[in-house]
Amino acid sequence: MSINLHSRRNFLKLTASGISGSVLSSLLNQAAGSVIPMRHHQAKAKSVIFLYMSGGVSHVDSFDPKPMLKKFHGKPMPGKIERTQFDANGNITASPWEHRKWGQSGLEMTDMFPKIAGRADDLAIVRSLTAKFSEHAQGNFFMHTGFPFLGYPSAGAWVNYGCGSVNPNLPGYVVLKSKHATTPHGGVSIFGNAFLPATTQGSIFDIAANHAVPHISPAMLKTEQRRALDLIGKLDKRFADKVAAKDAVMASVANAETAFLMQEAVPDLTDISGESAATKAMYGIDSPNVHKAGYGRQCLMARRLVERGVRFVELSCASHGIGGGGGGNPWDQHSDLQKGHAAMAEQVDGPIAALIADLKQRGMLEETLLVFTGEFGRTPFSQGSNGRDHNPYGFTAWLAGGGLKGGVAHGATDEFGYRAVENIATVYDLWATVLHQLGIDHEKLTFRWSGRDLRLTDVHGEVWSDLIA
């Protein structure tokens, strides 16, 4: 998309004097809608859609079925059991879902996600993922940032920083929410930019509200806004020349310009009247299940965002409040797992399968990388009578598109699905692989902060090369 010439002229005027060359180049390129890449090799993907299942999906009931659970159902778990979150551990519990081979690839999955499983030949399943933390907030921070606490940028911010902006009319990193969808435990900081430029942080679009972004409809004439922005920009520029945090101030100027341009871009984005009835039905946005309809609208909006060049889009699940899965961790069924997981799967299964199919039929799947995971998995033994506790020792994520192979599996857990035992994988490996597909060497994507070159993968991470097409 192009930017209004009058807006560009004013923006150039307010930033052209006394700004360091690197900051000026960055801002002017961003204002003009150009990509400022940090490419280290040929990129296969342009955008990422992060399907985050906050609370922890049970891998042994979905993408990593284990026949031994049925064989030893009701018997004590052999070997050492690590301390769990609530330490109310019962016996081995069989999955209430049936498993079989799916697609031409024959990937084994249960029927908990029948429509996603029906896309088996598009999935690259990682069955040996591990995490370092079994508590939700720490797990959410770790999965998003590579660190278990505040103060580090989200993966979306790193992608936005490393790949640069394509569309100046929209943020490069968008977090979608719909009715009843909540922010994962840890709060909005898991979408933050920390020490990276403010332009890289996640922007939350509540697509269930009258306006996805508050105050998106201007309260004053566009010409008056333009004059106000010019004046504020000039004042900010003078202030920036006198302080050490010049980059942060000028990032604020750039964010104000993006907000100005979003007044037209966001209403156009969220107006789905031009989508066909078949497309809307495929995503389930008219479903009587309000949670499924909301998630379906998020999936459709994710496709529309990446079509417009947004680099990183994250989706949010809504809570059913079943079996302890409430608030920011809707997949957290410590009791009544069958009922709770079934409700959550009904919410996301059809919409995600529709998203994969829609991207594929539009020729966009190869350049869009989908990532599906929670912060950990769940135990093969029960908590109480019919729940499962947190399990960070071995769980499943899957990826699709973005230049990766489909119909393949990487790694394995033991025969009960408790611990990763083959090709043990980490969160660092996940993001190293995502960055690699975007054309970025994760070891070279660094930012100097407090005397150290920091990165998303800390000092770890190996690319899952066997998954690359």
Image (spheres, rainbow, N blue to C red):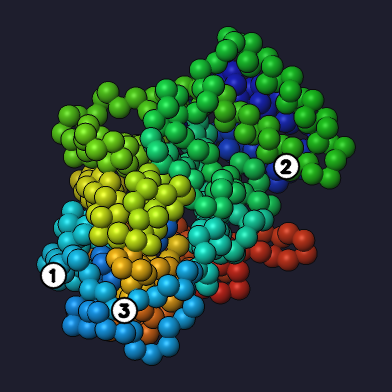
109, above or below 363, in the image: below
Kind of residue sitting beneath label 1: Arg
Separation of marks 3 and 2 at Cα, in angstroms:
54 Å
| Image location of residue 96, percent across then percent down | 19, 66
Left or right placement of residue 356 versus residue 87 in this view: left
| Image location of residue 300, percent across then percent down | 30, 38
Q: Quadrant of the N terminus?
A: top left
Report helix, strand or loop for mark 2: helix
Which-is-in-front pick, marks 2 and 1?
Answer: 1
Pointer 3 residue = 91
| Image location of residue 337, percent across then percent down | 30, 60
Q: Quadrant of the C terminus?
A: bottom left
Extreme-bottom residue of the structure: 79
Pointer 1 residue = 100
Circle 3 Cα neighbour tier, 10 Å, few/some/many (<14 / 14–19 / ≥20): some
Pointer 2 residue = 248
Please tell me which residue is depicted at 52% across the width and 52% down the height of the picture.
Answer: 185
